[in-house]
Amino acid sequence: MRRLLVLLTAMLSVGCTAPTADPVTVELDVPEAGIAQPLEQHVDLGAEVTLRITSAVDDELHVHGYELHIVTPAGETVEEVFEADMSGSYEIESHQAGQVYMNLIVS
Ligand SMILES: [Cu+2]
């Protein structure tokens, strides 16, 4: 019985192993003129990402793939927290300016 319990515990802890990526904060400051050349930002797969955005203009940002829509009132700092659980390159696009501000690379 004791042996069975040990085995079960071992199996459960393997099954529950979470990615060991550290949480990360990604800052995105958008000036009034926007961002002509997309920034590039890498985050580790499995990391908890805090996206901290400060925009000089009213905007709505779309994180492609993760399908986050983030409203950013002018001059305010907005935070969006999500789990980077899909690998790939994801555009963070302004639906106001029609520009890609950042490519978020998850790997
Ligand atoms: Cu979009």
Image (spheres, helix red, strand yellow):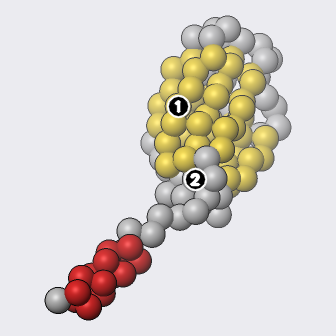
x%, y% of residue 79?
56, 26
Res 63 → quadrant: top right
Residue extending farthest to the front is 2
Q: Mark 2 points at which residue?
A: 47
On screen, residue 25 versus residue 69, left or right, reads right
Please name whichever residue, 71 or 79, is drawn nearer the observer in this view of the structure: 79
Judge whether 53 appears above or below 5 on screen. above
x 77%, y 13%: residue = 32
Residue extending farthest to the left is 1
Quarter of the figure with the C terminus:
bottom right
Callout 2: SS: loop
Distance between the alpha carbons at the discs numbered 1 and 2: 14 Å
Judge whether 95 appears above or below 90 on screen. above
Quarter of the figure with the N terminus:
bottom left
Please name whichever residue, 12 or 32, is drawn nearer the observer in this view of the structure: 12
x 36%, y 81%: residue = 10
x%, y% of residue 58?
60, 12
N-terminal of the pair, mark 1 or mark 2, is 2
The three-letter code of the residue at mark 2 reads Ala
Q: Name the residue under label 1.
A: 80
Callout 1: SS: strand
x 45%, y 42%: residue = 67
x 47%, y 37%: residue = 68
Judge whether 68 appears above or below 96 on screen. below
Instruction: Characterize the local packing of mark 1: few (<14), some (14-19) or many (20 or more) Cα atoms within 10 angstroms.
Output: some
x%, y% of residue 95?
57, 27
On screen, residue 86 versus residue 106, left or right, reads left
